[in-house]
Image (cartoon, rainbow, N blue to C red):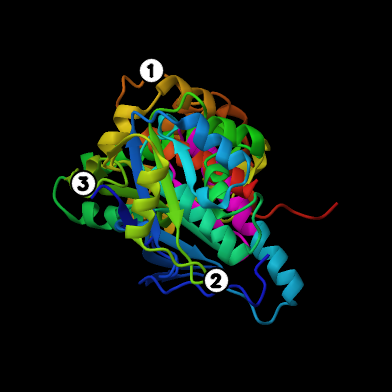
């Protein structure tokens, strides 16, 4: 537990890149100035009782880190975790050079001949989500903003300063990664997995109106890579009829 | 000079990390006895290089240990140097972590780490002189090349339950997997 007398750590430069309701996301470095890292910081909420605040922060931080490590060890494409300080609400993880599928789709759909590239991204997206669900991990906030395409990757080990080189792979061919498992959980329930798919479908429809049929490709690849997908697909029909929230009547 | 001094990111300036590597070490059992006897002249983290896959692997353990010292203000082991060895472990068994990652009688390649502090500052030069007196072996460069040469793949596979047979090549994937296992212990 961080006591008030804890030695203050020096301010290694960090640059705020995103702010959500719960966390601030910074670009920073880990171990060496040559190793870029992403810092997800859950700051204190002054309106919460300090004891409760610490408990919630710790719990959320740890559960996210556990999910990431677990997913990665199962071969699901998520960022690697470098370091966790749950009391301060910090997770250091792999820096991913690239952009979200949301941004890339807009660019590709606007460009000539981007359709084929988009199709390939859809297939890999379905495969990634299929793998995730096959491992009984539910993302909790699966949107096109929370799937990233790595457009450039470091080659070589983390510590190697000289031999690092970046390989540009282009937007269409880059590795796909699922990010932000902050709302994720472990669940075997078809309902939870179906809601994941539903949320993703809504994200598609609301941000890429022309991309309606694309979600079909995602589902197809999903079913191919996840053996137990049948009941989930059936449940998706129900969820579509009623929306994300389950009726609490009766 | 084969000693390296690093200032790790997010770690205060006084906590300089001095790292020195040796190969063909011949007095491992003597060094181990000094550690077991708690001889404070031998307060270093002696890591058996055969269990390390890369420089980042060693540095991550140092970072975690110094972080435990400064922020959590709670060490699980005697001092920050033994904590470094313990932080390499993928589980919570301290004795086992010393046996696997620390110096043993059969150790020939060694990575020594000394962490300076505000209270007990120690310079790179002093560390180097002392270590060269203490360790009988050939100084080596602490870099990924040295690490790859000394890595015992069967041992790494056993310690971290990774798939063996990497053909002596450390891949980025393996490095991240090992780092993930270390984090996993810290987060429980």
Q: Are marks 3 and 2 on the same chain?
A: yes
Pick the front one: A223 or B157: B157
- The magenta-colored residue range is A60-88
Residue for point 31% across, 31% down: B148
Residue under numbered circle 1:
B165
Distance in Å between CA atoms under marks 3 and 2: 35 Å
> Where's residue B92, x and y in %?
66, 40
**Circle 2 SS class:** loop
Residue for point 53% across, 38% down: B181
Of all chains, the one bearing label 3 is A
Distance in Å between CA atoms under marks 1 and 3: 24 Å
Distance in Å between CA atoms under marks 2 and 1: 45 Å
Residue under numbered circle 2:
A21
The image quadrant that residue B177 belongs to is: top left
Give left or right: position of B127 versus A163.
Answer: right
Q: Is residue A185 shown above or below A57?
A: above
Of all chains, the one bearing label 2 is A
């Amino acid at each position: 537990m961080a006591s008030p007398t804890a030695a203050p750590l020096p301010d290694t430069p960090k640059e705020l890149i995103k702010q959500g309701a719960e966390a601030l996301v910074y670009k920073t470095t880990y171990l060496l100035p040559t190793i870029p890292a992403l810092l997800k910081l859950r700051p204190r909420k002054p309106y919460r009782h300090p004891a409760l605040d610490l408990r919630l922060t710790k719990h959320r931080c740890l559960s996210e880190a556990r999910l990431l490590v677990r997913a990665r060890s199962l071969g699901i494409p998520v960022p690697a975790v470098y370091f966790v300080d749950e009391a301060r609400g910090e997770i250091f993880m792999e820096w991913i050079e690239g952009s979200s599928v949301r941004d890339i789709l807009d660019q590709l759909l606007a460009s000539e001949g981007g359709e084929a590239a988009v199709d390939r991204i859809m297939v890999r997206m379905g495969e990634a989500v299929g793998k995730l669900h096959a491992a009984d991990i539910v993302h909790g906030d699966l949107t096109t903003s929370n799937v990233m395409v790595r457009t450039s990757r470091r080659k070589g080990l983390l510590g190697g300063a000289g031999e690092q080189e970046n390989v540009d792979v282009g937007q269409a061919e880059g590795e796909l990664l699922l990010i932000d498992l902050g709302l994720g959980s472990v669940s075997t329930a078809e309902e939870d997995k179906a809601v994941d798919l539903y949320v993703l479908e809504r994200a598609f429809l609301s941000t890429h109106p022309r991309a309606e049929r694309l979600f079909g490709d995602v589902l197809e690849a999903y079913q191919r890579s996840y053996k137990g997908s049948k009941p989930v697909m059936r449940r998706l029909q129900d969820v579509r009829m009623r929306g994300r929230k389950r009726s609490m009547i009766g | 000079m084969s000693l390296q001094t690093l200032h790790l990111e997010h770690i205060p300036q006084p906590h300089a990390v001095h790292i020195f590597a040796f190969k063909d070490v011949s007095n491992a059992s003597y060094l181990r006895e000094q550690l077991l006897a708690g001889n404070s002249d031998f307060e270093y983290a002696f890591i058996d290089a055969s269990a390390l896959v890369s420089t980042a692997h060693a540095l991550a353990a140092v970072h975690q240990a110094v972080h435990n010292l400064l922020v959590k203000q709670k060490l699980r082991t005697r001092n920050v140097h033994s904590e470094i060895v313990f932080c390499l472990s993928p589980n919570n068994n301290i004795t086992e972590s010393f046996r696997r990652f620390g110096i043993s009688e059969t150790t020939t390649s060694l990575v020594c780490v000394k962490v300076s502090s505000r209270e007990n500052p120690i310079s790179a030069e002093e560390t180097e002189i002392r270590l060269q007196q203490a360790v009988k072996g050939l100084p080596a460069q602490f870099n990924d090349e040295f690490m790859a040469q000394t890595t015992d793949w069967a041992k790494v596979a056993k310690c971290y339950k990774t798939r063996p047979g990497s053909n002596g090549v450390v891949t980025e994937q393996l490095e991240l997997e090992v780092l993930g296992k270390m984090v996993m212990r810290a987060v429980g």
